[in-house]
Amino acid sequence: MTISQIGARISFLTGLGTDIYLPEDRLISINKYYDQLHSIILESQDEWDFDDSNAADLPIAKTTLTTAGTYSLPPTIYRLNKLEVNYGSGLIKANPLDLNETNLSESEVLSIVSVEEPRYRIFGQTIKLYPTPTAEVVEGLQLYFDREVAEFTSAEVTTGTKNPGLDRLWHDYIAIGASLDGAIKFDLKNQNSLTNKLADMETRIRKYYGDKNVDRKYKISNIIEDYS
């Protein structure tokens, strides 16, 4: 469903033209429900990780390892899934560190970590590595993350051809949500109907993304403990 078709769907569900339910108000609601839908997907997804199909690259960030030891996270990051660091002998997965959980001071942490078992902490939008690198390594830091979706712009609405970067099955969620906002603003009689439609679709979205990778098979078996 293109952004133009989403707009037409909003007009159909509300019975309101763009002279009443203004394009700028629709755009705000469209992007709000696009973000909300993204959040639902991230909460529900199985091993098949979601990423906006409008993106031209993968959600993997690489940067040079430096002796500073601190690095800024990408501005579009929502959730960090994995961090790998190369101190000179190849990339190794680093494990997260929370000083509040370990009850260790920073100096104590530095005394127990190694380049073979690196750790990292996150402060806001900054990552700190343990141990601190002693040399530069090109692309020595690699992040795998979930990032924000590319929201619609007014220019894209005018062009009308861009699609939401997710499975076409659920594009209507955005139109229904934006229609609900219009129904609330203009006190339309179908508010409850739109609310129910939105809730029903959310349930189906969570089920769909929670079991999208059907290649994963689970086997349950009984284990009898022998205590003799």
Image (cartoon, rainbow, N blue to C red):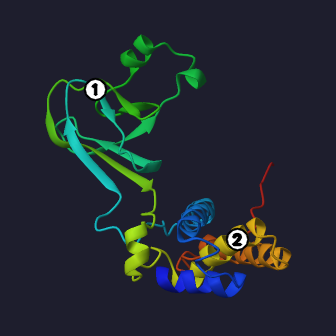
Percent across and percent down for residue 112 are: 40, 20
- The residue identified by callout 1 is 69
Judged left or right of residue 171, residue 191 is: right
What residue appears at the point 53 percent right and 22 percent down from the top-left corner?
Answer: 99
> 152 or 59, which is in the foreground?
152
What residue appears at the point 42 percent right and 35 percent down from the top-left corner?
Answer: 125
Percent across and percent down for residue 205 are: 65, 75
> 13 or 82, which is in the foreground?
13
**Quadrant of the rendered image containing residue 147:** bottom left
Q: Are marks 1 and 2 in contact (CB under 8 Å)?
A: no
Q: Residues within 10 Å of mark 2 (few under 14, many from 20)?
A: many
What residue appears at the point 37 percent right and 17 percent down from the top-left corner?
Answer: 110
**Quadrant of the rendered image containing residue 93:** top left
Q: Measured along the vertical axis of the image, is residue 113 above or below residue 137?
A: above
Amino acid carrying label 2: it is Gly
Q: Measured along the vertical axis of the image, is residue 226 above or below residue 95?
A: below
Percent across and percent down for residue 2 are: 47, 83
Q: Give the residue at the far front of this rendering.
A: 19
> Which secondary structure lies at badge 2?
helix
How far apart in space, not on screen, are marks 1 and 2 (Cα)? 49 Å
Residue 160 can be seen in this image: yes
- Mark earlier in primary sequence (1, 2): 1
Percent across and percent down for residue 85 are: 28, 40
> Which secondary structure lies at badge 1?
loop
- The residue identified by callout 2 is 182
Q: Measured along the vertical axis of the image, is residue 65 above or below residue 110?
A: below
Residue 218 can be seen in this image: no
Q: Residues within 10 Å of mark 1 (few under 14, many from 20)?
A: some
Which of labels 1 and 2 is toward the front?
2
Amino acid carrying label 1: it is Gly
Judged left or right of residue 65, residue 129 is: right
